[in-house]
Amino acid sequence: MSFSETTRARAREIIARYPADRSRSALLPLLHLVQSEEGYVSPAGVEFCAEVLGLNKAQVGAVATFYTMYKRKPTGEYLVSVCTNTMCDVLGGQKVYDTLAEHLGVGHEETTADGRITLEHAECLAACDYGPVMTVNYDFFDNVEPQAALDVVEELRAGGRPMPTRGARLCTLKEMAVQLAGFADERDGAVADGGPGEPSLRGLRLAEQHGVSVPGFDPKTPIRSKAEADRAAAEAKAKAEAAKPAPAPEQALPEAATGSTAPDVKAPDDKSPQVRTAETRQPDASTPVPDAPGTKVPVDGPAPAPRDARAAEAAGVAANPPAGDGKPAGDAAGAQERNLKEAESGTGADGADPADANGSGVRK
């Protein structure tokens, strides 16, 4: 698929938001962007993101398949998600989902024949205080019951856009993907609708009731624009720099200095070797620096040769008496070596081919 010039221009704008050497950070909004044009992240969308970011398709695909908000097959205009996790399930969320599935004739991540509704059950929609909850393109319908959920989907199928319990007015999944890519909702007054839910305001109500407030906070203080905030931050930084005291002149090292950049500290000879090794490999604020006098940095030596390992094992076996039940404390290497030679030669101890036993490779 060839993406529109609008999508390509938006892609360039998204990439420009990030430092030049961190452009791959733009991948998440770019995936939303291609979803806004196709309704899902298609193989062409993966290729487009890889092309504009200089990545390979496997890198893009790994991200697109990790997050559930990126759909890998065509999705309806309205994504209806019903929370069926513990809290909502107890409050009736599973019944809401089952009612919708039966009424629409679709299951999880399936779309109605008219292409309007895609149904999915969600593990959690982060709104336990409003359960059971359902979202339509990620806008909330709180405290839903089966019949109320049916009314919402039927209005959607009829071309209407029911008002969510909280948040702005509904939009299609493609329109929502544009917003998730980082672009404003261009519909007139789209974000003026809706409002917060009462459970979300409970903390504010309690603060007002008990006179709790942030010291010196004026709720009527206007919110500054980004340019004004940047200018104020620059001015504050300049004042802080001007208020800094002049740096003290550097003092020469005493004549008896050892040449080490570390302060002279007592050598940690009174500590066990294990403690010294642990402190050197994983230091904390109280650990002497590696070049402090008396501090030795352990260096891992080469791995022992196989011959040395066998000699060490043999010495260990010889140094250990047999166990109480008469079994040797170590493994007998002779039997293992004999079995290995027999396996390599393809014959058993009696000279017979191990595969000649009933044709199964097991000797009688």
Image (cartoon, rainbow, N blue to C red):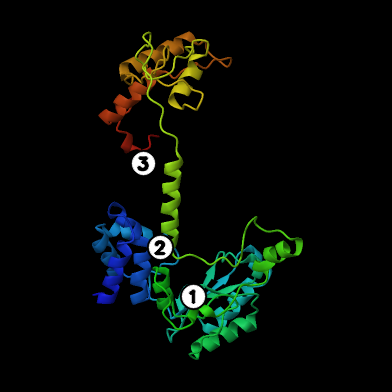
Name the residue carrying label 3.
Answer: 358
From this viewpoint, is residue 347 visible? no
| Residue 51 locus on image (x, y percent) | 24, 63
What amino acid does circle 1 point to? Asn
Residue shown at the point (45%, 38%) measured from the top left:
244
| Residue 327 locus on image (x, y percent) | 52, 17
Circle 3 residues within 10 Å: few <14, some 14–19, many ≥20? few
Closer to the observer: label 1 or label 2?
Answer: 2
C-alpha span from label 1 to label 3? 66 Å
Q: Residue farthest to the bottom?
A: 158
Judged from the image, the secondary structure of the residue bearing numbered disc 3 is loop
Judged from the image, the secondary structure of the residue bearing numbered disc 2 is helix
Contact between labelled residues 3 and 1, with CB atoms less than 8 Å apart: no
What amino acid does circle 2 point to? Ala
Name the residue carrying label 2.
Answer: 227
| Residue 275 locus on image (x, y percent) | 51, 19
Judged from the image, the secondary structure of the residue bearing numbered disc 1 is loop
